[in-house]
Image (cartoon, helix red, strand yellow):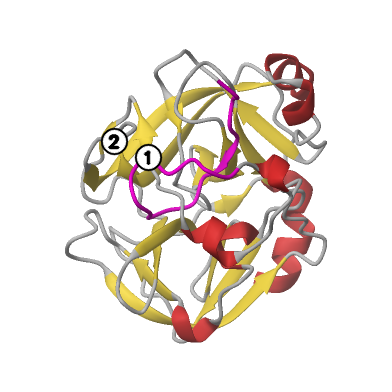
Amino acid sequence: MIRQVCLIALLCVAGVFSRTIEDNVDDSDWYANWEGFIVGGQNAAAGQFPHSVSLRSTANSHFCGAFVVNNRWVVSAAHCTINRSPGNTRIIVGALQLSSGGTNMATARIENHPNYHGPSLANDVCALQTSANIAFSNTVQPLSMGSTHIGGGAQATAAGWGRIGHNLPLANTLQWLNVQTLTNADCRNRHSAGNAARVHDNTICTFTRQGEGMCNGDSGSALFIGSSAIGIVSWGIPCAQGFPDNFARVSSHRNWLISHTG
């Protein structure tokens, strides 16, 4: 059976794995048709991860994660927004559950990295501006954008909404998981040759053990240490099968992000 590489975006019919990055497609249907979940995680408590953002359609369907960086901007993955407009994208801050709570905000601008490349997922970074100021509270707070290059062996955390396993129900409550970073060389060695080529110098990878990790979904959510974002969920091999998860490295994209978000 051919291993498939999937984008970690959200919401589709369960079990659809009919396209891979090798198809060299870059269309909105593909990016919209992937589910999301953290495998082996646990429920978050209210206010535990106040930076977490749910990106939704105007029909209130969650399709990707994001994280707050200041009172007008959130950061996500470019594959989440490359085919979207501000008019069909909502930003929900301060939510713990997908079914209720949080503040639903309109999107004023979407800035995708100019060098984003869909087939290779290079520079998979974007920023979204809210139409009004984000009110900070005990459930809404920003993450700083980390400037330090993180190597292997660091413990980091990821949090996102979605399923907790293939063909299992969606987790309504925000899930979180502690993971270990890898060096890029180690990350490439753990992937096939084709997938190793998608581990760019501005990528950061994580792997702890089989049965724990990102899966189809949670794209755009932060990988973070303390109050500092170090990665943005980009792609992986579903689901927690023993391969590294892959993130856009924040320190590599920090200057671009700051120039667009202030």
Is residue 84 placed above or below 256 in the rendered structure?
below
Verify CB contact (< 8 Å) between mark 2 and mark 1: yes
Is residue 70 placed above or below 151 in the rendered structure?
below
Answer few, some or many: residues within 10 Å of disc 2's Cα (few below 14, many 20 plus, some between 14 and 19): few
| Circle on res. 116 | none
Q: Is residue 113 magenta?
A: no
Provide residue 176's location: percent of width, then percent of height.
Answer: 35, 36
Provide residue 96's location: percent of width, then percent of height.
Answer: 24, 54
Q: With 153 as the anchor, is 90 left or right in this view?
A: left
- Identify the main secondary structure in magenta: loop
Residue name at image x 64 percent, y 29 percent? 205
Mark 2, residue position: 167
Is residue 232 placed above or below 104 in the rendered structure?
above
Q: Is residue 5 magenta?
A: yes
Query: Can residue 68 be seen in the rendering of this structure?
Result: no
Residue name at image x 55 percent, y 57 percent? 31
Q: Quadrant of the C terminus?
A: bottom right
Measured Cα–Cα span from mark 2 to mark 1:
6 Å
Provide residue 6's location: percent of width, then percent of height.
Answer: 56, 40
Residue name at image x 25 percent, y 40 percent? 44
Task: Name the image quarter holding residue 182.
Answer: top right
Image: magenta residue range: 1-19
Q: With 98 as the anchor, is 82 left or right in this view?
A: right
Provide residue 81's location: percent of width, then percent of height.
Answer: 58, 67
What amino acid does circle 2 point to?
Asn
Nearer the N terminus, badge 2 or badge 1? Answer: 1
Is residue 194 placed above or below 80 in the rendered structure?
above
Residue name at image x 59 percent, y 40 percent? 235
Mark 1, residue position: 15
Work out which residue is located at the far left of the displayed protein and give it. 100
